[in-house]
Image: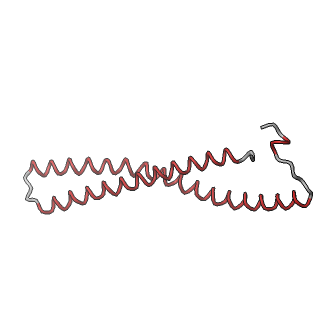
Amino acid sequence: MKLYENPYKQMRKNYETIKQNYYRLRDELSRVDKQISALYHDLEKTDLSEEMGYQYAVALQNMLRKRRIIKDELISLEILRNTFRSSFEQANKRLSGNRTKSEEIRKSLNVCIKIDEVVKI
C-alpha cells in the first residue's frame, strides 16, 4: 500500500458526495422551476379577485424563496465540484506520470522492496 492511497480515496469519496448532492439539488431546482412555471400558467388563465391575487402572490413568494435557498446551496456545491474535478484531473495526470517514471527507475536499479518494508505504517 502506498501512503497517499487512503487520503486519495477519502478525497474521492468526498468528491462523490459533493457530486451526488449537486445533482440532487439541481433536480430539485428543476422541480421548483416547473412549479413556478405551472403557477404562472395557472395565473395567466385565471380571473383574479383580490383574495385570489393575494393567495397567488404568497404561493409564488414561497416558491421563489425555496428556489433561492436551493440555488445558493447549489452554487457552493458547484464551486466545490469544479475545484475537486480539476484537482483530480491534474492529480491523476501527475500521479500516473510519477508512477511510470518511478517504476522505470526502480526496475533499472533492481529495487524490489515496498514502502511498508522501509517505514512502519
Residue farthest toward the top in the current orientation of the protein: 120
Task: Indicate left or right for 103 with 35 as reference.
Answer: right
For this rendering, which residue is in front, 98 or 71? Answer: 98
Q: Is residue 109 above or below residue 14?
A: below
Task: Indicate left or right for 62 with 109 as reference.
Answer: left
At x 23%, y 51%, the residue is 60
Q: Is residue 71 above or below residue 41?
A: above
Task: Indicate left or right for 95 with 104 as reference.
Answer: left
Residue farthest toward the right in the current orientation of the protein: 109
At x 31%, y 55%, the residue is 31
For this rendering, which residue is in front, 90 or 107? Answer: 107
For this rendering, which residue is in front, 78 or 120? Answer: 120
Image quarter in which the C terminus is found? top right
Residue 80 in picture, x, y percent from top left: 54, 51
Residue farthest toward the front in the current orientation of the protein: 112
The scheme the figure's colours follow is secondary structure
Among the 4 quarters of the image, the one containing residue 41: bottom left
Residue 103 in picture, x, y percent from top left: 82, 59
Residue 101 in picture, x, y percent from top left: 81, 61
For this rendering, which residue is in front, 87 or 107? Answer: 107
At x 81%, y 37%, the residue is 120
Task: Indicate left or right for 78 with 107 as reference.
Answer: left
Total numbered labels placed on residues in the image? 0
Residue 39 in picture, x, y percent from top left: 20, 57
At x 14%, y 48%, the residue is 54
